[in-house]
Image (cartoon, grey):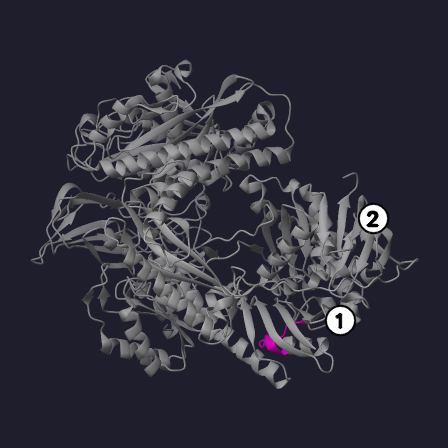
Amino acid sequence: MKSIADTVVTRGGVSGPKVHATADPITTEIVRHSLNSAANQMKQALIRTAFSPVIYEVLDFAVAIYDRQLRLLAQAPSLPFFMGTMSFCVEAAIAAVGGEGALDPGDIILFNEPYGTGSHPQDAAIVMPVFLEEQGDETLVGYTTIKAHWLDIGAKDPYATDTVDVFQEGTIFPGVKLYRRGERAEEMYRTVLANSRMPREVEGDIKAEITGVRTGAAALLRTIRRFGLETFETSVEQMFNHGESTVRKYFERLPDGRYVGSGEMDSNGVEDDPVPFEVAVEIDGSTARIDYTQAPSQQRGPINCPLPSTVSASRVAITMLAGGGEAPNEGHMRPIEIITRPGTLFHPVSPAPCFLCGWPAIQAIEVIYGAIAKAMPRTVPACSGGDICGVNFYGARPSGQPWTAGSPHPVGQGGHHLGDGGTMMHISEAATRFPPTEVWESRYPVLMEKVELAPDSCGAGTHRGGLGIDFFFHALEDMQATTTVERTRNAPWGLEGGGEARPNSALLRLPDGSTRPIRKETRLNIPRGATLEYYTGGGGGYGDPNERDPERVHADIREGYLSEAHARKHYPQAFAGGKTP
Amino acid sequence: MNLRLGVDVGGTFTDLCALGESGRVRVTKVVTTYPDPAEGILQGVHTLCDTGDRVVCTILGTTAGLNAVLERRGAKTALITNAGFGDIYRMGRGDRPEMYNLHYHRPKPLVPRDWIFELPGRVGADADIIEPLDIERAALIAREIDSGGFESVAVCLLHSYCNPAHELELAALLRRYAPGCSLSLSHQVAREWREYERTSTTVVDAYVRPILERHLAELASGLKAAGHSPEILVMRSSGGLMPASKRTLEPVTVLLSGPVGGAIATRALIRELGLDDALAIDMGGTSFDVTLLTGGELPIGSETEVEGFPLLVSGVPVHTIGAGGGGVVWLEGRGLRVGPRSAGSVPGPICFRRGGTELTATDANACLGLIRSGTFVDGDLPLDIEAAGAAFTLTAAALEMDPARLQEGVIEIVNARMVGAIRALTIEQGLDARTYSLVAYGGNGPLHAAALAEELGIVRVVIPASPGAFSAWGMLFSEVRKDLSLTSLQSSSDIRPDDLEGLLQQLDEQATRFLVEAELDPGEAAYQWRAAMRYQGQEHTVEVPLPAPPASTRYLEEVLALFHELHQRSYGHSHPRQVVEFVTLRLSVLGPASTPEVAPAQAQAERAHPKECRVRWQGREVAVPIFHRDHLATGGIVGPCIVEERTATTFVPDNWTLEVDTDSRSLILQRGGA
């Protein structure tokens, strides 16, 4: 990171010490896959033993392995939006405890300071330094780390859309040793649990995370021992170089230029005005520069996006596009530069509130694709529903037992030059899943009334968008909810002549039948018998609807994806000459 | 003589392997017949049997179900769900299995949206009826299904794993109003929670059930008509056998049965050869299957998937790609592609002269001289090499390249795709393929194995006896198996020892019923008890092997202690004071194992002077000696050479040597210097 006047440039991992030896390509491939496999083992250990559905069903976490220079060696498929933030977590956590020199084998650090993790305090990072023991010497060789969503760590509410500073957002553990030389630091441990409304779940999840980082450390050491540290390091350099060249080759094919995309947040959470912003994408040879310097000032409400989150959003957007379908490592990040200005929406300064930092990050991803589409529309899909349409319910069961549960939800994806959009999680949460109705209903006092695709909710096009979904949650007991429905004021855009789709929305239907619209709300009262209705957005269309194959229009009508009226309006060619489905 | 028969029905060929009481093994290979595979099987039985022979038991592995799914040729299937939940089947869980693919789309579902019927009525998570089933609407749907020409119905209603009442009510109506339809009920197919995964499993079951039923009925009646016993056992994906009566048929459990026979046979073979780690590769006419055996064991997973559709059934993980001898050569722009689509047996490769007009990998092998007319399938299937050559000349002209180079290129592409599949199972899991032996079988495996090994840095290739019929041979080593389960959430704070025993008793009774239906002696069956357990609050469970009930008074205590110990061992932590939950109790019943006695190979004199032929290999025409496998007694032959036999052809490149392992009658290929 270096400052140019009042802006900050963040670049992907620098090259390590120059290594001249070359590892053979087969060994490099095995090292690369061994590392990915180690990350996957961490993930399995975590979800197999975690206590809260947000981890084991929704997969709201990231696991990663770093080398000693804090370069990403591997990560398991999980929450993409977290994945790009992990190096910041590790760096800040190590610095907080006193740097490398203060680390001992068996130490495990807890770190959840929002400006270091890039997330709200609930997303707590566990970091374990990994030491290689050889002939009595202990050498620090890397770190294993997990950032996972804890159900509660003492924010003003179990989930909040209206905080005004970070201190309302949860208890902060600014890099503290939870284990010293393998021994648990009991006083710190008790302090953590004492700050949670859900200590039993948090304790179970901490233990699962500890198991995860230890599993990863053992797997990393096995890989290093198998090949020897030197061969291992050479292979890692080759692996980074390969990742870097994959992304560089992609950008070399694109025309140089500066492309500006614009987006808008519905509100900042405490004031109701929309918050418009611009992101510019500059292609310069083989480098992609993402410029956030035109962003508005940091906000009073919690939609501020700390730098690690901004960097992560940019890396997610670019590596999904240009990474050749591979799991990204540090090399893939090298061609990406991010420029921000401190004091703004995308580089706020503490203690600005940032509980909802993920939401501007999601919008930024869409806007980056929107900017790229201006130059090269065939490379990206049209806009998706553009949100994860999250909900968090909480309350107390009749026994007095507190409970909380949340989930993101799929939206329609944009059509693209290869075909129609589907209905899936937003790309920023590509590996997350929504919980089965049977799991919801077994664990919480909720009856799902429907989970159903919404006909006509997609943007028209040669390749239409994916459909949005209607999710109806019926309350069987009094409860409260925090809703985070974003992008309700702007319809998802189409590309190359494709049409707009239905935007996200939500309604609360009270037992007396009255309704009111819902966006971002905290502690929304949902009395027994009321229904919270989510209508997730569709995807924008791609290409002129008049070019759509009439056969496909008829198939869509037959299968009930489109009503005949919608089809007649947008696809007249399918009815030309009195043709009917 | 009484014979036990193993049959492996592939997309192109059907392999048969018969074992008589004398221990003599006979094999044959016939072309798979469509649409009725029984015809081909019966033809093979006729070839194998001498006068006085009687097949007493047929063990069948079949890809008929899997191919129906892959090619979307299954039964016309309706799906019935709760009102408001018909789209669960299309949405899945909302995730993207290819998370770095911006343009990802889900595979085409087996049931189009307009064949999904929604029915009012709800069962709650606590098994209470929240809303009664809408009987009138159910009857209407049943009639509509009857008149709509549906062959099969899948039913998946919410919470049926804990209370199947609505599914059973609906089933009664369907049997009454749509009697011609076969029926798959989710609580019977996979009694586990998670509606999407259960629906997906049930739909696949329904989609293949009529096909499998027809296939089995035709085979049974054909066997009977020919004077054989109609008893058929079907190989399951898990490697166990399933009696094929209509009552015991569980189609979704046999979906991946074809490749499993080969994996079982490989396990037996590598144990005999004293090898630990092996990659079993099966290349037939249609597909290429890889199974990884580590430490001499077959892995068994508790969930599998086919084409991205989850299946809640246990199975041996087999990685399959469409790359067989029948893989069709095609052009994409100026790029050359081979497969994944196969020409199958009809129309088949051009050189088979069965109407095929598209070039395939087998055509390339024929033109390169690696397989020969007159010896391929002992001459039973003459090859028209000229026709294949002419087609290559045409395609080569379009690409402005040398026809011989094109033929070699086709083989290189097929090999590269197979190498990719092997890498997915080894290197991409962090395993070093170089330390594994390659066990190659299937009609085309031995021909390509050495080239794949070269590419992967593998130094040992094993070609079993009768490689083309190896999967069929493996069928004879398996035993009847039935997996029973009972999901019943019980917590250690409430459960009494009697409750646990009562639940296990229920499973025991089901097992006894199954054994009676399968006409097996309960005294000879082995029982394996397990419980899926977890700490309260966790979701995923640990499978704890249980001691056999009836239990001592301390049984429950013992089981809890076993759980804590296993959790500690698996994950490094345990919580002995926390409440423990029992989620699912499982019982696997295994019939008596079959360990066939095989007579040793009859020594045949080695031919002093092998024949010779010219093949094209790595850009050069070379003269290569050809041996017949029956005449190879010892080996010690330095490549290049070709070994021919009825069911396959083995190619040994230069830099490789060939040995014969006399006990197992396998060919062992070692890379030079190894």
Q: Secondary structure at mark 1?
A: loop
Q: Residue at 60%, 56% (x, y): give it.
A: B289
Q: Which quarter of the rendering shows the N terminus of chain B?
A: bottom right
Left or right placement of residue B221 versus residue B76 in this view: right
In reply to whether residue B34 is colored magenta, the answer given is: yes
Left or right placement of residue B453 versus residue B254 in this view: right
Res B41 → quadrant: bottom right
In reply to whether residue B423 is colored magenta, the answer given is: no
Could you tell me how far apart the alpha carbons at marks 1 and 2 are, in whole angstroms?
Answer: 27 Å
**What residue would you read off at disc 2?**
B639
What's the amino acid at mark 1? Leu
What's the amino acid at mark 2? Gly
Residue A202 screen position, x and y as percent: 27, 36
Q: Secondary structure at mark 2?
A: loop
Residue A84 screen position, x and y as percent: 39, 32
Residue A76 screen position, x and y as percent: 44, 38
In the figure, B442 relative to B38: above or below?
Answer: above
Which span of residues is magenta-colored? B31-39
Q: Chain of mark 1?
A: B
Res B440 → quadrant: bottom right
Q: Residue at 79%, 48% (x, y): give it.
A: B653
Mark toward the start of the polypeptide (1 vs 2): 1
Q: Which mark is residue B381?
A: 1
Q: Residue at 24%, 22% (x, y): give it.
A: A350
> Do circles 1 and 2 both sit on a common chain?
yes
Q: Which mark is residue B38?
A: none
Q: Residue furthest left?
A: A512
